[in-house]
Image: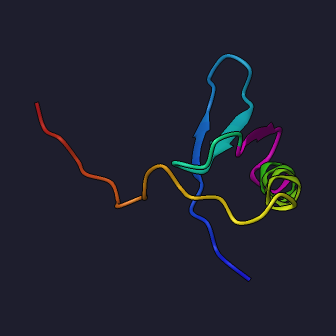
């Protein structure tokens, strides 16, 4: 079992949560709650992994605060 890091954002207009796995083409989804988003991302990952383990195009490193 492998763990992937998802980036999660929330749209202020639709109030939907959206998430994606950095560098994993096609690994994105949305949901009305974080739990629904997590379930949807899990299903997407299962489908994508049926073709085998992908070679990730990028690797999540972290976040940085930028002051201006």
Q: Is residue 4 or residue 10 the one in the foreground? A: 4
> The C terminus lies in which quarter of the figure?
top left
Asked which quadrant contains residue 13, the reply is: top right
Q: Is residue 64 or residue 59 the one in the foreground? A: 59
Q: In the image, 56: left or right of 67?
A: right
Q: Was residue 33 drawn as part of the magenta stretch in this picture?
A: yes
Count of numbered marks: 0
Residue 29 position within the rendered picture, expressed as x and y whole percent measured from the top left:
76, 40
Q: Was residue 67 drawn as part of the magenta stretch in this picture?
A: no
Q: Is residue 14 or residue 58 the one in the foreground? A: 58
Residue drawn at (83%, 50%) of the image: 44
Residue 1 position within the rendered picture, expressed as x and y whole percent measured from the top left:
74, 83
Pick out the residue farthest to the bottom.
Answer: 1
Residue drawn at (32%, 54%) of the image: 63
Looking at the picture, does residue 18 appear above or below residue 40?
above
Residue 56 position within the rendered picture, expressed as x and y whole percent measured from the top left:
53, 56
Residue range corresponding to the magenta coloring: 27-36
């Amino acid at each position: 079992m492998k763990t992937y890091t998802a980036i999660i954002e929330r749209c202020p207009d639709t109030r939907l949560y959206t998430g994606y796995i950095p560098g994993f083409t096609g690994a994105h989804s949305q949901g009305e709650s974080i739990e629904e988003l997590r379930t949807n991302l899990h299903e997407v990952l299962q489908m994508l992994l049926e073709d085998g383990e992908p070679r990730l195009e990028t690797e999540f490193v972290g976040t940085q605060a930028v002051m201006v």
